[in-house]
Image: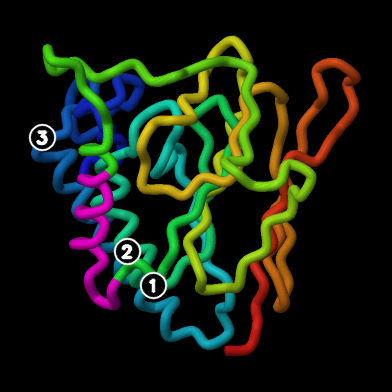
Amino acid sequence: LCANYSYAGDSGGHMLLHAEHKRLRDVVCDDPVVTQKGNDMYTWINQTLQQWDQDEKLLWKGTVLHHPMWGKWYPDFANIVLNFLPMLQEHNFDVYLNGHEHVISYAHYPYAQVPRGSYHHQAFVDYMEAQLDQEYFNDHLLREYNCQAGQESFFGRDPSERTIRMAKGEALHQITTGTSGYDEYHLCLDRPTMGRFTYAQNIKHGWSSVHVDENELRIVSKGVDPDTDEIVKMYELVIENKPA
């Protein structure tokens, strides 16, 4: 498992190997040292999650990564979706927090669409369907999607209702907080993706805060209005721990 292997097959030239190599050089995903370290990390993550499953006091589960799983600028990140997402599903994670993209967005992936025990298979099926939904020209070049700066979308939701409420265990939630960048990153609202997006914007700079107790996990995303400099709530996610 190459930890920074992206959808495009590159390896992230900013990452450097450790002292096992006599000289510094960019990571190459098929390098045996990188492969072994990735496999060791994968094993450690699995063992840790299995220990967590046995802890009755552990209520909420979350993970923080640099890259998103699903996006409306980049395509879905294949390595994360095909290797890490099934682990999160198997161990019933609640939230996935990430940055990287200079946008602020929220998407979820319903647990109901994943047959119990078929996590890797379903992730592969959903990923491939999203890729096949992309449109190509006759010369096999990917069609340019409607990517623009200065957008805010609720994907069909009522813009006046900025609170999203869901029950614990209903879905895995991806919170992308990338500060936003009006002139840096565009949003491609019509790009196919595995994630079910209900909010995305690249107008306001902002941040997210997480509040947790035994009853709910609440994430509030706030930003600065570029016209008034006022702090405004962009969206709020409330995951409620309801009795089964």
Name the residue that disc number 1 marks: 91
The reply to whether dot 3 and dot 1 touch (C-beta < 8 Å) is no
Q: Are marks 2 and 1 in contact (CB under 8 Å)?
A: yes
Label disc, if present, on residue 87 of the rendered structure: 2
Q: Earlier in the sequence, mark 3 or mark 1?
A: 3
Q: Is residue 225 left or right of residue 148?
A: right
Q: Residue at x 35, y 67 (%)?
A: 113
Give the crowd class for mark 3: few <14, some 14-19, many >=20 residues within 10 Å.
few
Q: Earlier in the sequence, mark 2 or mark 3?
A: 3
Mark 1 nearby-residue class (10 Å; few <14, some 14–19, many ≥20): some
Mark in front: 3 vs 1: 1
Q: Secondary structure at mark 1?
A: loop
Q: Main secondary structure of the magenta part?
A: helix
Q: Nearer the viewer, residue 227 or 8?
A: 227
Return the x and y of residue 11 as percentages of the image width and height.
25, 27
**Disc 2 to disc 1, C-alpha distance:** 6 Å
Q: Which residue is mark 3?
A: 30
In this orientation, which residue lies closer to the viewer: 20 or 152? 152
> The magenta stretch spans which residues?
115-129
Up-down relation of residue 25 to residue 174 (above or below): above
Q: Is-magenta flag for residue 119? A: yes
Residue 211 among magenta residues: no
Q: Taking 38 as reference, is 29 above or below it?
A: above
Q: Left or right: 234 with respect to 144?
A: right
Looking at the figure, which quarter contains the C terminus? bottom right
Is residue 141 toward the left or the right of residue 102 in the image?
A: left
The amino acid beneath tag 1 is His
